[in-house]
Amino acid sequence: MSGSAEETKKHVDIYMKVAGALAVLTVLTVLASYLDVAVPLAIIIAVIIATAKGSLVVSYFMHLVDERSRTLIFTLALTVVFWIVLMLVPFLTISDTYGVHKPLPNADAAHAEDEAH
């Protein structure tokens, strides 16, 4: 534990600033929800704000800002890479079907039966 009152006050000040930043980012999140933008842009805005909030929590409240371990840095970097891949998989799997009409099989079967009778 820290021995001096000044060091404790310094940590409390940092925590209060981070809490204030999280409060501001939360208000920004609510305000961003009222923006009239396309869905992809809204998702990008939400992810940017969530990344900023998450990095503040991880850095200060989980005390990772003071860590200098290469293993930790490698693990976090690998996590980011896997997250990006997981976010791109749905986009890359449907991007080749944009603009292609794909009717459902037997979608008008009931209509065809009515015409036959």
Image: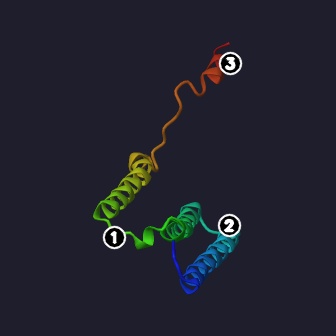
* Front in this rendered view, residue 17 or 42: 17
Q: Are marks 3 and 2 in contact (CB under 8 Å)?
A: no
Q: SS class of the residue under badge 2?
A: helix
Residue bearing the label numbered 2: 33
Q: Earlier in the sequence, mark 3 or mark 1?
A: 1
Looking at the picture, which amino acid does disc 1 mark? Answer: Arg
Residue bearing the label numbered 1: 68
* Front in this rendered view, residue 86 or 6: 6
Q: SS class of the residue under badge 3?
A: helix
Residue 16 coordinates in the image, percent (x, y): 63, 79
Outermost residue to the front: 3
| Residue 40, quarter of the rendered image | bottom right
Mark 2 → mark 1, Cα distance in angstroms: 37 Å
Task: Look at 56% across and 65% down and name the residue there.
Answer: 50
Task: Look at 61% across and 79% down and name the residue there.
Answer: 12
Task: Look at 52% across and 35% down and name the residue there.
Answer: 103
Specify the label residue 114 is tagged with. Answer: 3
Mark 3 → mark 2, Cα distance in angstroms: 47 Å
In the visual, does 55 lie left or right of 33?
A: left
Q: Nearer the observer, disc 3 or disc 2?
A: 2
